[in-house]
Image (cartoon, helix red, strand yellow):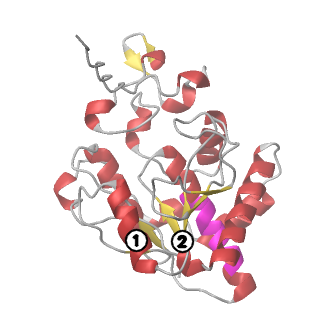
Amino acid sequence: MIRAILIMSSLAGAMVSTPRLRAADVGDAAALHARFVDYSDEPLRHKIDHSIKILEDALRVFGPDAVYASFNGGKDACVILHLLRAARHAHAVKSSNREKPKCIYFDASDDFGEVRTFVRDTCEALSDELAVEPVAPDVGYVDGLKKLVSDAKPRALAFVLGTRQGDPNCGDQKPFEPSSEWMPAFMRVNPILDWSYGDVWSFLRTFDLPYCSLYDEGYTSLGSVSSTKRNPALLSNEEYKPAFMLEDWSLERAGRVEKPKKKAAVVP
């Protein structure tokens, strides 16, 4: 069984009034995989094929039950979630292993209500494909990973992430990259490292895949409520354009609020 990280507990208290996501909005994995196979426009087709190959390799090498997909409701997480669905279908056809995947999401009380609602609705819409495993709210990322890795010992785990080149802390990561020494030991799986901001939106819009409503309201990169604002580059005639209309992709994180730097100690 593929394990991913998706958290449903504590989401009930953060519901907002947005259109409910339905199973019909995401389709089934077999149909989605077929659409990817039939798609012919380059270079996106090549990137989709390459990403699915990376995910199939992760499933084959680590075993489906040792592969976790991190889903936080962001645009990049949406991409890897649907790529994983397609890769899992292809792997199941080849291996006859049709167990449900799991998703895990490190829920935080300071996340946007729209994001938490979208995560909940996505889980429900994909309930035929995904098994939701509750995780306590406001559990830190590192602490959560430590517990998952500890519980799985001695087996190695692989975590599918939505990291792209240029992201903070990406560095020179490869598609398969061991975790940093200060983190618990696991393998990072990065299927969309070479995807651009434009690739992400081309993928989601070409295949009509759902994403959080905040991206239609001027947000281009989502973090906590306190660290995120609308992207000023999308402001036009006193209104904000949707995220996919951002022309300068280098400004993707222009709406993120930098944490104040600690002042250096003054030595008398």
Q: Which residues are magenta?
A: 81-91
User: Please, what is the three-letter code of the amino acid marked with disc 1?
Assistant: Leu
Residue located at (38% from left, 17% from top): 239
Residue 104 found in image quarter: bottom left
Can residue 224 be seen from the camera position used here? yes
Residue located at (21% from left, 49% from top): 109
Q: CA distance from mark 2 to mark 1?
A: 9 Å
Q: Is residue 141 above or below residue 147?
A: above
Q: Is residue 67 left or right of residue 257?
A: right
Instruction: Work out whether residue 170 or residue 242 is closer to the camera in this orientation and state it.
Output: 170
Numbered circle sitting on residue 148: 1
Q: Which residue is mark 2?
A: 157
User: Of all residues shown, which one is farthest toward the left?
Assistant: 13
Can residue 209 be seen from the camera position used here? no
Instruction: For label 2, count other residues whose C-alpha is less than 10 Å away and answer few (under 14), some (14-19) or many (20+).
Output: many
Residue contact between numbered discs 2 and 1, judged by CB atoms under 8 Å: yes
Q: Is residue 18 above or below residue 228?
A: below
Residue 214, x across and y down, in percent: 38, 37
Residue 240, x across and y down, in percent: 41, 21
Q: Is residue 139 above or below residue 234?
A: below
Instruction: For label 1, count other residues whose C-alpha is less than 10 Å away and answer few (under 14), some (14-19) or many (20+).
Output: some
